[in-house]
Image (cartoon, rainbow, N blue to C red):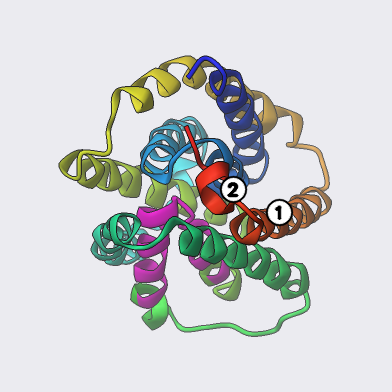
Amino acid sequence: MNETLPWVILIFVGAGTVRGAVGFGDALFAMPLLAMILPLRTATPLMAVIAFFAAVVIVLRDWKHVEIRSAAILTVSGMVGIPIGIRMIRVVDEAVVLVILGIVLIGFAGWNLRAKESDWQISRKLAPMFGLMAGILGGAYNTSGPPLVIYGTLRRWELSRFRAMLQAYCIVGSVWALSWHAMEGNLSQDVFVYSAWSLPLVIVATMVAQRMTEGMDRQRFVTLVYWLLIALGIGLLWNAVAPGGPSEVTAN
């Protein structure tokens, strides 16, 4: 742990900065990097702890924009998917998990890079499907963001509602996911130690990023984040298929 702790803290500071600046993307930033130095059974519940507190910091300012009905539909369907995703990390080979996560990263970022030009608008009736997908990805890899962001984009949410809705889902989803991780025995001592060391800096990074990006061109910043996620996804796919496989990449 002494060797990995500084890297874990650094990863989460970056994740908190991304979350504070754009309202999402912390797990998509952190999970590929965490998967390179920690087992998924440690990285996934650890990310859930960090995501919960980062969401609380943000929603304290954006709570007025939460649309209760839509948030409830997404959250309830997400809760159904979370235990499915958590079970997956026990029965699915880690190499497969890393490949899936890499594809999710590349697909999510690539979709959003061209979504700016999309004129599609979907019905609210599809919310349970997107919530379920978010729950499965959130339970397995703490990457519930892609389905929610795609749904919000296609529903034409304004930025304030977009940020608030993601945080509302994350708070409830993180608590639910952590409850299942506890039942599955995934809340190890390492999870608590990493969390205790990381949280103070994560909270500061999240708050600072919120303030610093208020007057920035958010679209330009988000575009840079998407390109970074594509690069991370490619790196994750390479680590999953390279000689030595994920056993070396995810060793504690």
First along the sequence among labels 2 and 1: 2
| Residue identifier under label 1 | 235
The quarter of the picture where residue 219 lies is bottom right
Overall secondary structure of the magenta stretch?
helix
Q: Residue at x 47, y 32 (%)?
A: 252
- Image height of 136 relative to 59, above or below: below
Label 2 crowd bin: few (<14), some (14–19), many (20+), radius 10 Å: many
Label 2 sits on what residue type?
Answer: Pro
Q: Nearer the viewer, residue 119 or 78?
A: 78
Q: Nearer the viewer, residue 143 or 62?
A: 143
Name the element at disc 1: helix
Judged left or right of residue 49, residue 18 is right
Label 1 sits on what residue type?
Answer: Gly
Q: Residue at x 42, y 61 (%)?
A: 137
Judged left or right of residue 208, residue 212 is right
Q: Nearer the viewer, residue 209 or 162?
A: 209
Question: Can residue 157 be spotted in the picture?
Answer: no
| Range covered by the magenta-colored residues | 129-150
Q: Nearer the viewer, residue 171 or 134?
A: 134
Name the element at disc 2: helix
Residue 147 on the magenta segment = yes
Q: Which mark is residue 32?
A: 2
Q: Residue at x 33, y 49 (%)?
A: 173
